[in-house]
Image (cartoon, grey):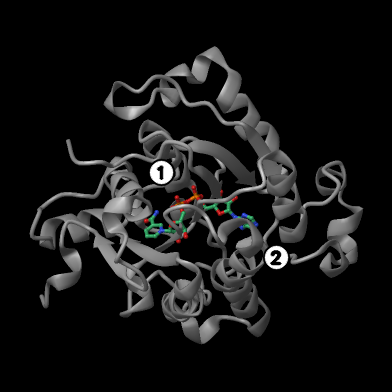
Amino acid sequence: MIPLDLTGKVALVTGVGDDMGFAWYIAKALQAAGARLLFSVHPRLMTIVENILERDLDAESRVLPFGQGELKVEKLLPCDVSFDTMEDVDEKTRADRRFAKHGDYSIQGLMKGVAAHCNQLDILIHSIAFSPEIKNKAIDTTRKAYLTALSVSAYSLTALLRAGLPLMEGRPGGASAVGLTYLGGDRVVPHYGGGMSTAKSALQIDAMQLASNLGPKNIRVNLISAGPYKSRAAGAIGDIQGMIDYAASRSPLPRGVKAEEVANAAAFLCSPLASAITGEVLYVDCGYNVMGL
Ligand SMILES: NC(=O)c1ccc[n+]([C@@H]2O[C@H](COP(=O)([O-])OP(=O)(O)OC[C@H]3O[C@@H](n4cnc5c(N)ncnc54)[C@H](O)[C@@H]3O)[C@@H](O)[C@H]2O)c1
């Protein structure tokens, strides 16, 4: 049988906030292939994710695909990717008890947590995006919101890889990072404002740069450009259902994309089957991106 085997690999999945987002499904696909899991969760969402991992009510969400049992996460690590170190944290955030109770919630703290737990990192999933003005058209976006979108949604991939590098280099078979992008980084998608389209463009060229920088260390960096999907973050965009229906009606495969399909593509990109693939954007969008009209 062809080996999509991640046994013995440690995967850090960032951007887990509930059991609907891409991160959750990607985590389940990686574990179904044998990976050990660590979650990085926004400090304000830690309790929500802890509950989903434990409650009977959410048992169905934890069922792994392909009959591989139940999701088991070894550690939840709080991280707000706006901060490289705790020295970067602004006064308002520092004073917020929902953050303070977690101690070090910077990217540096996250990677220290991974090092303390298992001292290896084979797979990094970047599934994070945010703009405080996502509903604003580009022309109406403030500088502050634009820079926040870039910092959280794009630069964070660079920051995570730099901080994670000592744990990722020298892994047997190499290491792999996969991030999530969207067609709005290539073309104009109405509703996709607030600096988010710029952030996705930046993320795409960054992934290529990082693939080039880290290739000699046998670390691969790829992105999945997913079709529109009704996650919590996408709900903030505005007419997400309209976007899904529009894409479905014009795609070669005339339907919306499923989170499981994005997750399966991520598992492939992280596996030895993709060992010569790096710096790529893989469109998992039912083919919508190839259409002219
Ligand atoms: N849903 C779609 O239609 C779609 C399409 C293509 C790409 N994507 C991308 O997929 C990725 C995951 O999004 P999703 O749609 O699954 O939604 P989601 O809401 O499940 O995931 C977004 C995550 O980003 C996290 N986040 C935001 N700001 C953060 C910060 N400062 N520090 C740490 N974490 C932070 C949130 O906590 C949340 O868990 C994003 O990069 C998104 O742009 C989504």
Furthest-top residue in this view: 56
Horizontally, residue 213 falls left or right of residue 268, namely: right
Relative image position of residue 179 (x, y in whole percent): 44, 61
Q: What residue is shown with label 1?
A: 26
The residue mark sitting in front, 1 or 2, is 1
Q: Quadrant of residue 21?
A: top left
Q: Which mark is residue 82?
A: 2
Q: Residue at position x 48%, y 35% from top?
A: 19
User: Residue 259: percent from the left, percent from the top?
Assistant: 33, 44
Direction from residue 193 to residue 52 in the image, left or right: right
Observer able to see residue 31: yes
Q: Position of residue 238 (x, y in %)?
A: 43, 59
Quarter of the image holding residue 82?
bottom right
Residue 164 shown left or right of residue 249 in the figure: right
Tell which circle, 1 or 2, labels the residue nearer the N-terminal end.
1
Residue at image position (42%, 47%) is 22
User: Which amino acid lies under the numbered mark 1 shown in the image of this protein?
Assistant: Ile
Residue 291 is situated, as x and y percent measured from the top left of the image, at 12, 72
Q: What's the CA distance linking mark 1 and mark 2?
A: 23 Å
Q: Amino acid at mark 2?
A: Ser
Say if disc 2 is inside 8 Å of ligand 1: yes
The image quadrant where one finds the N terminus is top left
- Between 184 and 205, the one lying in front of the other is 205
